Amino acid sequence: MTVKIPNNAQLFEHPLVLFDGICNLCDHTVRFIIKRDRNEVFRFIPLQSALGKALLAHFGFPPNYRDSFVFIDNGRPCIKSTAFIQISKKLQMPWPLFSLTIIVPRILRDYIYNKIGQNRYNWFGQHDYCETQPAEMSQHFLTELPQEYTDLR
């Protein structure tokens, strides 16, 4: 099966946050964002889901990419500290102020991000991947690949 996601796909109407679905830190970060997403604009996609894998391929990431959140806004991806800065801009106050960290050189921001990322399973643990989310949050999550994006050749 091949997957083709058009660049103008309806999927990109919302900012998308791709996250490691087995990482406890990532899971808590997603819940943090949801609680502060006053306008409910974000949609969350586990990297391990069919849709997550298809989006990784669409944007040229390796199939087992787990190094960072991938934030896709207006059809454009960003990763690591830049992803968090862009996400913070869309949250309720005071979190948009976090975007001021853009003045810190990206190499330093990403160094810190990478150190946390490399140790996240040791420090925060992990759990088995499960595509089900708490019922009160289910409208925020996407996991299934829409049929119109698959080509069963």
Image (cartoon, rainbow, N blue to C red):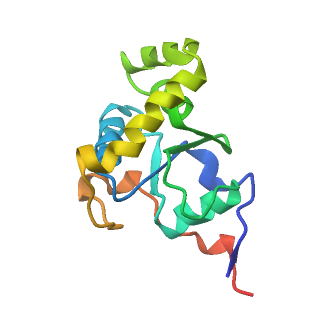
Determine which quarter of the picture holds residue 61. bottom right
- Image location (x, y in percent) of residue 7: 75, 53
Q: Residue most toward the bottom?
A: 153
Q: How many marks?
A: 0
Q: Would you say residue 117 is visible in this rendering?
A: yes
> In terms of depth relative to the viewer, which is nearer, 140 or 18?
18
- Image location (x, y in percent) of residue 143: 46, 64
Q: Residue at x 32, y 67 (%)?
A: 130
Q: Residue at x 41, y 42 (%)?
A: 117
Determine which quarter of the picture holds residue 88. top left
> In terms of depth relative to the viewer, which is nearer, 11 or 32?
32
Horizontal side, residue 128 vs residue 47: left or right: left
Is 67 rendered above or below residue 39?
below
Is 41 rendered above or below residue 106?
below
Is 94 rendered above or below residue 5?
above
Is 106 rendered above or below residue 130?
above
- Image location (x, y in percent) of residue 105: 59, 17
Q: Would you say residue 90 is visible in this rendering?
A: no
Horizontal side, residue 92 vs residue 145: left or right: left
Q: Residue at x 74, y 52 (%)?
A: 8
Horizontal side, residue 82 vs residue 140: left or right: right
Q: Quadrant of the C terminus?
A: bottom right
